[in-house]
Image: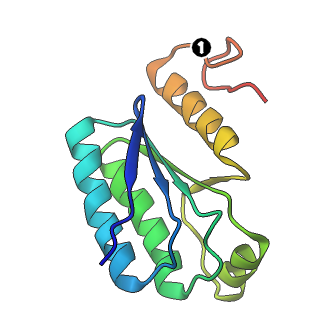
Amino acid sequence: MERIPILKIGDVLLVSIQVDLEDHSVLALQEDLAEKISATGASGVVIDISAVEIVDSFIGRMFATIASLSRLFDADTVVVGMRPAVAITLVELGLTLGDVRTALNLERGMEILEGLTATRRGTPGANGVPGLARR
């Protein structure tokens, strides 16, 4: 079974899904990510799904579960790069991603996490205002 790589960039973990998702690979990702957040103390997770073409109800629910798990470790999650067909499928299945934040691309996702981290610390974000990232 091929594992999905998890890269550390500063205090953010980047998960770039470049393979077709199957139930066992998503479950493995959930475990790997929990271990990596715990080991690194990461404050944020970006899950890039721009290469994902198809999702089912199980995989959709697992994204929400991964975000909840990340929050338990005090890390925020942003899903980036969702294709229109994937978004339509999630809506048609009646799935929501819970409190998972989404962004069109990786750059915007990183800005969102920067703003959330700044808010948590009470420090200025990219544009000098706590919690607000530059657009």
Residue topped by disc 1: 124
Q: Is residue 51 left or right of residue 17?
A: right
Q: Residue 83 location, x and y as percent?
A: 73, 69
Front one among 5 and 71: 5
Q: Residue at x 53, y 86 (%)?
A: 57
Q: Residue 98 location, x and y as percent?
A: 54, 64
Q: Residue 46 location, x and y as percent?
A: 51, 48
Q: Residue 91 location, x and y as percent?
A: 71, 80
Front one among 99 and 135: 135
Query: Which residue type carries mark 1?
Result: Pro
Q: Residue at x 65, y 63 (%)?
A: 50
Front one among 84 and 100: 84
User: Relative to 47, does residue 7 appear above or below in the rendering?
Assistant: above
Identify the image quadrant of the N terminus.
Answer: bottom left
**Secondary structure beneath label 1:** loop
Q: Residue at x 38, y 52 (%)?
A: 6
Q: Is residue 60 left or right of residue 32?
A: right
Q: Is residue 47 left or right of residue 40?
A: right
User: Relative to 76, does residue 29 appear above or below in the rendering?
Assistant: below
Q: Residue 84 lies in what quarter of the image?
A: bottom right
Q: What count of labels does the image hold?
A: 1
